[in-house]
Amino acid sequence: MRATVLHDVRDIRLDTVDDPRLVLDTDAVVRAVASCICGSDLWPYRGENPLNGPTRIGHELVGLVEQVGSDVSSVAPGDFVIVPFAYSDNTCAVCERGIQTACLHGGFWGGPDREGHFVDGLQGELVRVPFADGTLVKTPAQPKEALIPHLLTLADVFPTGHHAAMCAGVATGSTVVVVGDGAVGLSAVLAAKRLGADQIVAMSRHEPRQELARRFGADEVIADRGEEGAAAVREIFDGIGADCVLECVGTDDSMKQALRSARPGGNIGYVGVPHGVKLHVPAMFGRNLGLKGGPAPVRAYLPELLQDVWDGTIAPGDVFDLTLPLDEVAEGYRAMDERRAIKTLLTV
Amino acid sequence: MRATVLHDVRDIRLDTVDDPRLVLDTDAVVRAVASCICGSDLWPYRGENPLNGPTRIGHELVGLVEQVGSDVSSVAPGDFVIVPFAYSDNTCAVCERGIQTACLHGGFWGGPDREGHFVDGLQGELVRVPFADGTLVKTPAQPKEALIPHLLTLADVFPTGHHAAMCAGVATGSTVVVVGDGAVGLSAVLAAKRLGADQIVAMSRHEPRQELARRFGADEVIADRGEEGAAAVREIFDGIGADCVLECVGTDDSMKQALRSARPGGNIGYVGVPHGVKLHVPAMFGRNLGLKGGPAPVRAYLPELLQDVWDGTIAPGDVFDLTLPLDEVAEGYRAMDERRAIKTLLTV
């Protein structure tokens, strides 16, 4: 099969590799219908995460089940499934508490599983899915073509925005600021709106992203950053800042922006993988700020979010503004790296 | 009047100072019935906070209203009142959201208010209370003598333990670990029990404190610290750690202990004033840990907690194991500094 391999910094290629096969009785093999490129894929692409030789990459996929192991009961060949960005048994003590991204037996795509068997990345044609029952979620029926981008966002980007909102405690009536206008930040706007936020401010300086933020539910857009941006936020929210701030970037600057934008007693939900974030604890303590975040437990959120996508209540797939065949995956990375695209969908 | 003054490191004296008077129409003057010494008073006493000359100290008091300004309507001379460790107008945008310790116009005892008028510390005989209506809470009637220690804990230590539990999201069925066996940690055990925690582990190596922790509701006591202590905690809680960890010390070691004791997706509530706490953000992110804390908004919690103390449902005053006349305040500090006493009550 063909699979995307990151060979070196900014050297990404579609290589021919061995087809994955069932290894364990709890496995499934899934054939890709569509995958996509994540903002977090850009960290290793840009060399900001260390690279140890050529690496299979990608962690968002929808596809059709091709084969299942003898212990798999919840999906069958032909089912259309969403493949979350982490695999999990969905039965361990941690999964039971809804944190499937820290499953005691699970893991992430593109490396060995805990028994040492290789697991592919998801920017390829086929993948072996460990713990198929615990990982995959099938759609109620075969989806129409137009629904596929929206379903694909359920593998990561939309539940990740939703996780930021959940971690910050967004509920009916909340005031919300979203820091970051990438696909996750835009998804967080939509998630906050869906959860009943009363007023949403998106921080963005790029016009097409501002427009999508408004479409997703932002009441105001602030282009300023730093102390000016925080002052603008505070002015909107009674001079004190917002109840909930969704930090969707992961840098020290974006975290500082988030902390400055919250009111005393407010909560920051953060989902951008932290790179160099330093926290000044006494300042957070003095203002009674809460901070919570991490890799979104997509599998926990999927049943609820899938329902809303399936019935058309939300259209999170509007974050895709570039669609390319898998052959052109390298151009997909370049477009996102150069911020020409918000998010690239890859058709197989 | 006589008031406690910290002159230098470990040099604390009861001095004769000018009587406080009403300055603003929103003030009251309160005569002390009992005050006490807080673990946080030990930071400046030990020289771990910088000292800028002699400082009036103390921030926990119950007493009788002696005089009120012309704009004060909620209390009258003769009322028995609880004086929280921060004064607040209880009407600003921040107070409205329940964070009275960050009141836009309020402050802390023992220094100038925002208009530059001096505000006494609370280990003295009399005090000018700014924003009397927003700060003071009166009891339903004159309390019996035996109730006074319990009422006094409502000025700080018990609501602070309660705040740790609230920040960590303790609710019916929660599993809880309390780090710190000082008066705040013990109060946190009682608060977690009151909120319906299912299982509470107290970390303590001092027998009298272990005993009080059990009396307050701890199901298990762990004397080990560090990785051993964390391993013991995880063993009790399904091998993964507790839902809620209440960090009641404020050092880097105690915070590390707290972070290690939480399950993935768990929440740390922290109320020990942080001294040198450093957070490793990627590790917190990887485990989806939440962190929230700060100075407890005592004024917000008082009506609810006062009810439970008044009707005898809880007896938080059992944290006092030493009672001294105000004259012997210096011995009260020494006893706590040397860990001979958990918490010292001062009678006036």
Image: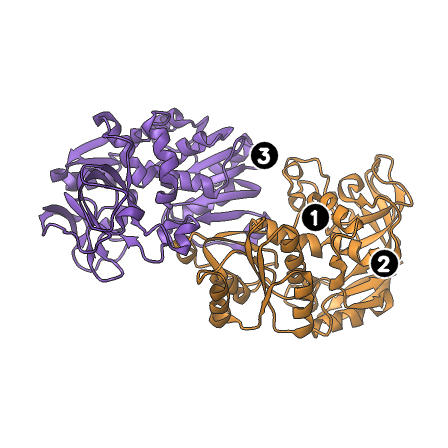
Chain colours: A purple, B orange
Q: Nearer the viewer, mark 1 or mark 2?
A: 2
Q: Amino acid at mark 2?
A: Ala
From the viewer's perspective, tell me whether residue A323 is left or right of residue A268.
left
Name the foreground residue: B25 vs B224: B224
Q: Position of residue B331 (x, y in %)?
A: 79, 72
Q: Amino acid at mark 1?
A: Val
Where does the C terminus of chain A fall, quadrant-wise? top left
Q: Position of residue A47 (x, y in %)?
A: 24, 53
**Splitting the image into 4 quarters, where does residue B275 fall?**
bottom right
Between the C-alphas of marks 1 and 2, the distance is 22 Å
Looking at the rendered structure, whether the residues under marks 1 and 2 are on a common chain is answered as: yes
Q: Which residue is mark 2?
A: B146
Give the chain of mark 2. B
Q: Position of residue B13 (x, y in %)?
A: 81, 68
Say whether disc 1 or disc 2 marks the residue closer to the N-terminus: 2
Q: Which mark is residue A239?
A: 3
Q: Secondary structure at mark 2?
A: helix
* A150 up-or-down from B232: above or below: above
Between the C-alphas of marks 2 and 3, the distance is 45 Å
* B161 up-or-down from A341: above or below: below
Q: Residues within 10 Å of mark 2 (few under 14, many from 20)?
A: few
Q: Nearer the viewer, mark 3 or mark 1?
A: 1
From the viewer's perspective, tell me whether residue B248 is left or right of residue A195.
right
